[in-house]
Each structure stands twice: as C-alpha cells, then as structure tokens.
Image: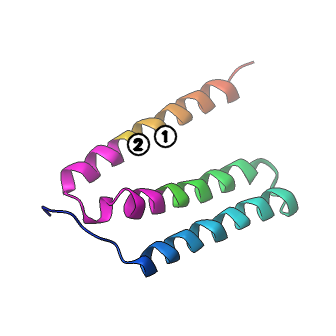
Amino acid sequence: MSGHHVVPFKTNLITFLTLVVLTVVTVYTAKYVDLGEFNLALAMAIAGVKATVVGLWFMHLKYDTWMNRAIMLSAIVFVALLFVISAVDMFTRA
C-alpha cells in the first residue's frame, strides 16, 4: 500500500491492552507456574507474541508491503537461529 495509514484510537487501545495482558501473564507464569526447564520456553513464546503484536500494529507491518514483512521475518528467523545454535552449544558441553 502506498500512502500513510492512520490507525484508529480503538485499535491502538486494544493493542495496548493486549500487551498489558500478555505482560501480566508473563509475570504470573514466571512467579507462580513451575514448568521446570520449560519456563524459559514459555516466557520466550509469550515474548514472541508480544513482539508480533508490536511489529504488526505499532510498526504498521500489517499495512505494509510483503517485502518489508519478509525482511522483518528474516531478521526474526536469524535471531531465532542464533538462539538455537547458542542453546545447542551450551547444552552439549561436557
């Protein structure tokens, strides 16, 4: 799409409330839910959802071209790959 896209206030408010709820869920699960080794995975999954919300609405990727979405997605994939390689290195040490 070309041109400037104005997001309605209601959409911004819903997005903000979604981020607040996800932050509360993150704090609650970190403090009261014991999943053992999977606590980090749960926290990273919630953080990933929050990053997606921020990228789509506050960075306007929802209304942007496929090229910008592909660039953002490739950056996320490479960061995830960095985390995976680091985790494999850490967990396979003697």
Mark pair 2, 1: CA separation:
5 Å
Q: Are the two marked residues, 2 and 1, in contact with CB atoms closer than 8 angstroms?
A: yes
Residue at 14% over, 64% down: 1
> How far across and down, in percent of the image, does residue 64 sit?
23, 59
Query: Magenta span: helix, strand or loop, mainly?
Result: helix
Q: How is the image coloured?
A: rainbow
For label 1, the SS is helix
Q: Circle 1 sits on which residue?
A: 80
**Is residue 85 inside the magenta stretch?**
no
> How far across and down, in percent of the image, does residue 94 sit?
75, 18
- Using the rendered view, name the quadrant where residue 19 is placed: bottom right
Is 5 placed left or right of 56 in the picture?
Answer: left
Q: Which residues are magenta?
A: 52-74
List the single residue furthest toward the bottom.
10
Is 91 placed left or right of 37 in the picture?
Answer: left
Residue at 49% over, 40% down: 80
Amino acid on which disc 2 is placed: Val
Is 84 placed left or right of 62 in the picture?
Answer: right
Residue at 33% over, 42% down: 74
Q: Is residue 49 above or below residue 38?
A: below
> How far across and down, in percent of the image, does residue 81 sit?
47, 36
Asked whether 69 or 4 is in front, the reply is 4
**Is residue 57 inside the magenta stretch?**
yes
- Using the rendered view, name the quadrant where residue 27 is placed: bottom right
Q: Circle 2 sits on which residue?
A: 77
For label 2, the SS is helix
Amino acid on which disc 1 is placed: Ala
